[in-house]
Image: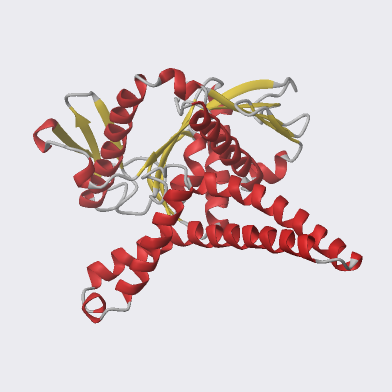
Amino acid sequence: MFDKLEDILLRYEEVLNELSEQDVLNDQSRYQRLMKEQSDLEPVVEKYKEYKSAKEGIADSLAILEEETDEEMRELAKEELNECKSSVAEIENELRILLLPKDPNDEKNVIVEIRAGAGGDEAALFAADLYRMYCKYAEQHRWKIDTMNSNENGIGGFKEIVFMINGAGAYSKLKYESGVHRVQRIPATESGGRIHTSTATVAIMPEVEEVEVELDMNDCKFDVFRASGNGGQCVNTTDSAVRLTHIPTGIVISCQDEKSQLKNKDKALKVLRARLYELECAKAHDEEAEKRRSQIGTGDRSEKIRTYNYPQGRVTDHRIKLTLHRLDAIINGDLNEVIDNLIAADQAAKLASMNEE
């Protein structure tokens, strides 16, 4: 590990030197690339410097204990030694986490698909609650929401809604949200006062660039139709909605939220690329199925990941057995504690896997 850290420190210093060169300053593409590399290396370098400083503190304290006869000075040196030893152990763990392989998608925007599952109209209302939850979470991070397609049920719920969250690091935070979300509550549509269990499925996909997925436009069939549902004057009176069918896979995507047929087509292609990328990743991961099961969820849409229990005011994430009695705050977008625990558990699983290897 420390050989790798020394290499990183050396590369960081090389990048800083390159950034000060005039020819780099004149080449914006190279300059931006080096700035990004510096930004990626900096947290590791700063933490490694902390580690080296703590190790020096240990050496200095031991030297004082060997040479010093004054009891007061020796006591101070012992305190310093204990503090530095504690810091070294803590920093070593932090460095291992920083050196874990980065998910190449972490900094990307995400496409979110929420679909009502079992439970009829109540499931659609729950899907709308999840949509608002993610929107409020995105607002806290100053991320932008762009709706791509929606299918309402007429009473404020969504049979399906697809939207993009634009923001640096969106995928790194939201990638653990894929799966089946379950709600237990008395539905607004239920007059008898009985508690029902309903579900909604969430899929989180990184936005994929054109070069990342091979897409033959001859495999794509486009149909246009008149948009339905709520919308502006033009939305309901022109053939602006687009239905995209990917013939080899049978994937069908509809987009109707824009007045422009061209914009709806562009959005449909973005969703298609994301879904094709997801299929490719699923195939690649199949051979590592056992390893994936040992980590924080498989990311499979059929995996039940979380329950929102309204009568008891609790939210339970089944993957990490985390229960929080803060349902109102969480459903209003305060997901930080849940997501932070998922990230920590994922990192712990990856570290354990690396130690086994």
Instruction: Tell me the residue at 71%/24% (across/down).
Output: 191
User: Which of 53 and 35 lies nearest the eye of the viewer?
Assistant: 53
Q: In the rendered image, which quarter is residue 307 located in? A: top right
Instruction: Tell me the residue at 23%/23% (across/down).
Output: 250
- Vertically, is 348 above or below 66? above
Left-right relation of 275 to 339? left
- Vertically, is 234 above or below 212? below
Left-right relation of 92 to 166? right
Residue 167, can we see it?
no
User: Which of 59 and 141 lies nearest the eye of the viewer?
Assistant: 59
Instruction: Tell me the residue at 73%/33% (across/down).
Output: 314
Residue 273, can we see it?
yes
Instruction: Tell me the residue at 24%/53% (across/down).
Output: 260
Please provide percent x and percent y for residue 351.
Answer: 53, 35
- Vertically, is 233 above or below 245? below
Furthest-bottom residue in this view: 22
Q: In the rendered image, which quarter is residue 27 located in? A: bottom left
User: Which of 209 and 31 lies nearest the eye of the viewer?
Assistant: 31
Please provide percent x and percent y for residue 101.
Answer: 42, 42
Please provide percent x and percent y for residue 43.
Answer: 50, 59
Instruction: Report the label total.
Output: 0
Please provide percent x and percent y for residue 312.
Answer: 78, 30
Q: In the rendered image, which quarter is residue 22 located in? A: bottom left
